[in-house]
Image (spheres, helix red, strand yellow):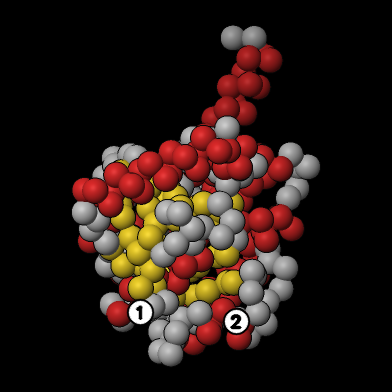
Amino acid sequence: MKPEDIIKDNEKRKSDTDLANYNGPGRVITSWDKLDQLQAEKKFEPTITLKTKIPDLDEHIRDCRGGQLVILSGDEGEGKTLLARTLTNSFSEQDARSLWFSYEERHDEFLAKFGETVPFFLLPSELEMSTLTWITQRIKEAKAKYGTIHAVFLDHLHYLTDEVETGNLSNDLGRICRKLKLLAVNENIIIVLIVHTNRSESADEPTIRSLRDSGMIGKEADTVVFIWRLDGGDDAVLKIAKCRATGAKNKKVNVSKIGPFLREKTFEPAVRQIHAEKLKERSQGRA
């Protein structure tokens, strides 16, 4: 063996030995070791599971689970935040604790929209133009003060553009969603993220490609639900464009605003046909 080959062989052996002895963060361990570690740290928590309490929606997505990134989307004024408030109320009825980051409204306006009885949830006393680091700190603070946090609501994605690093908005938004997904997994929480659409540019029903500014957003999400109102009234349609857990795709649920929240609604066939025709007319008007 040539001297230079001996040197390379010795360097490889040393590198292999160093890797075998590595005991730092991110080291590779066995599943049994990880179980022992979690139990020793008392972090072995059951996966959070919560129902939306909209029966057909729960049938299509099964439930919302810790570690999931759930996206709610739709045009401006179509009911995205209303849907998020409805989920907050449903989670509260299941004794779950949600943490809200609402950048669209003042706190008094936001709380008033829950009606006379505001459900229990958490929120920062004041909001900053958020970074994921700040949001993560608030989640950890909430856990330290109140125990298990089940869900985090973010209204909306584009308030996280302080995280933009590369100047490529599409890639940066995709990266932000990837970090939110990882945060959901690491903290065993449901993250509900509101995202705007580019739907005004299309006459079709919204699809994952309708999510504003980045096709990567939908790829990182576990569940994507769109909402649009029928004829500008209280009736609306939820469209499950994607659900990784069940494989549901393009399933629709009829709902109606009753009081401060959305409730499932079954339309008579004739009424359903009228709504379908109105939706078609509205779509053609955008073409």
Rendering coords of residue 25 (x, y %): 53, 55
Q: Residue furthest bottom?
A: 116
Circle 2 SS class: helix
Rendering coords of residue 10 (x, y %): 59, 26
Quadrant that contains the C terminus? top right
Q: Which residue is mark 2?
A: 109
Q: In the image, what residue type sits under mark 2? A: Glu
Rendering coords of residue 198 (x, y %): 61, 42
Q: Residue furthest top?
A: 1
Q: How many marks?
A: 2
The foreground one among 19 and 184 is 184
**Which mark identifies residue 183?**
none
Q: In the image, what residue type sits under mark 1? A: Ser
Rendering coords of residue 223 (x, y %): 39, 49
Mark 2: few/some/many CA within 10 Å (<14, 14-19, 20+): few
Q: Residue furthest right?
A: 167
Q: Which residue is mark 1?
A: 92
The foreground one among 167 and 57 is 57
Quadrant that contains the N terminus? top right
Mark 1: few/some/many CA within 10 Å (<14, 14-19, 20+): some
The first of marks 2 and 1 along the sequence is: 1
Q: Residue at x 71, y 73 (%)?
A: 128
Q: Residue at x 56, y 79 (%)?
A: 110
Vertical placement of 155 versus 212: above or below?
below
Q: Is residue 169 visible?
A: yes
Residue mark closest to the camera, 2 vs 1: 2
Horizontal side of 31 relative to 193 (left or right) equals left
- Is mark 2 in CB contact (under 8 Å) with mark 1? no
Mark-to-mark CA distance, 2 and 1: 20 Å
